[in-house]
Image (cartoon, rainbow, N blue to C red):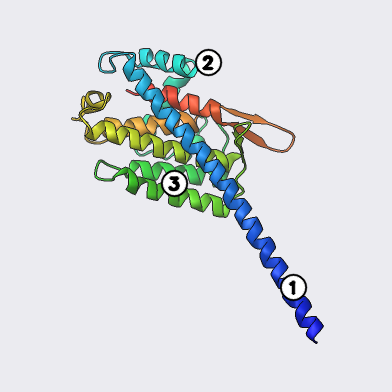
Amino acid sequence: MKKIVLSLSLFIAAFLFFFQSCKKSNNAEQGKIDAYFTKMGIRHNKLLDYVAQNCDVNRSSAKERFEISKEYLQSDNNWNSIRKVFSITNQINHNTKPSDIIRSKNYDGINYSNEGIVLVDSLFSIVNDANYNITPDNFNSSIDNLINYIYNNYKVNVDVESENANEFGYIIAQCYQAKASYAYWYEAYINPNHPWYDFVHADDQNRNLWRWLRAVGADIGGFFTSDCVGMDEESAWYDLVCAWEHAGNASAAVE
């Protein structure tokens, strides 16, 4: 009897050790992924600083700002692809759900799964419900709830070395893009010393959607509408660098 109890105890101890080891491993991997996404968000915001340093954002055209962002990112995006982003985000800004756009015959971007479409809708819902009374900390709290939900309910694969992800990793990247963008444009709206301050206030009469929030929408729209996707033998994979660059070009050229 004692041998049975001892064996059972050893089994339970081994199971708990294995469980805790897996949990620590998963936490470490998630931390690595989140650190990568945070770094890319910082890079995105530095791009916007670079554009402001190299032109008068209040007088330059959207295409001129786009060209400066291309120079910074060394991307090969074309102007027509960015104009298409604005067409889509304009619809979203006027209460069209991303899911309606993705399912439309005119949409030629990434083919999201049904689960992915719901998550993208949730992300844009958080953005569209925001306003200058919602601080970045409050905004981030809502986004983090969505990120945790994705981690807890879907298989998230992100390879930070190759900078590729599966669909759900790609959507989490969009969430981090939203956090970085919201912090930047919120600061641009409230800080008179910010290089984009006059730019975002030039459209103050349009209170249906502040210009700084349209900029946030353009950032995420540039990400989720990019065609940065490929296929291997088993599934689709998403090029994160390509998507970040697409979002950066769209952000710099916001109108």
Residue type at numbered disc 2 = Asp
Residue topped by disc 3:
122
Quadrant (top left, top right, bottom left, bottom right) of the C terminus: top left
Name the element at disc 3.
helix
In the rendered structure, which disc, 1 or 2, sits on the residue that comes first in sequence?
A: 1
Which quarter of the figure is the N terminus placed in? bottom right
Left-right relation of 112 to 212: right
- Give left or right: position of 3 versus 133: right
User: Which numbered disc flags the more N-terminal residue, 1 or 3?
Assistant: 1
- Mark 2 element type: loop
Q: Which numbered marker is on residue 76? A: 2
Residue nearest the viewer, comparing 60 with 20: 20
Which amino acid type corresponds to the residue marked 1 in the rendered image? Leu
Q: Which residue does the numbered mark 1 point to in the structure image?
A: 10
Left/right of residue 30 with respect to residue 188 in the rendered view = right
Report the amino acid beneath label 3: Ser
Q: Position of residue 30 (x, y in %)?
A: 56, 47
The part of the image, by quadrant, that contains residue 215 is top left
Q: Residue at x 50, y 53 (%)?
A: 149
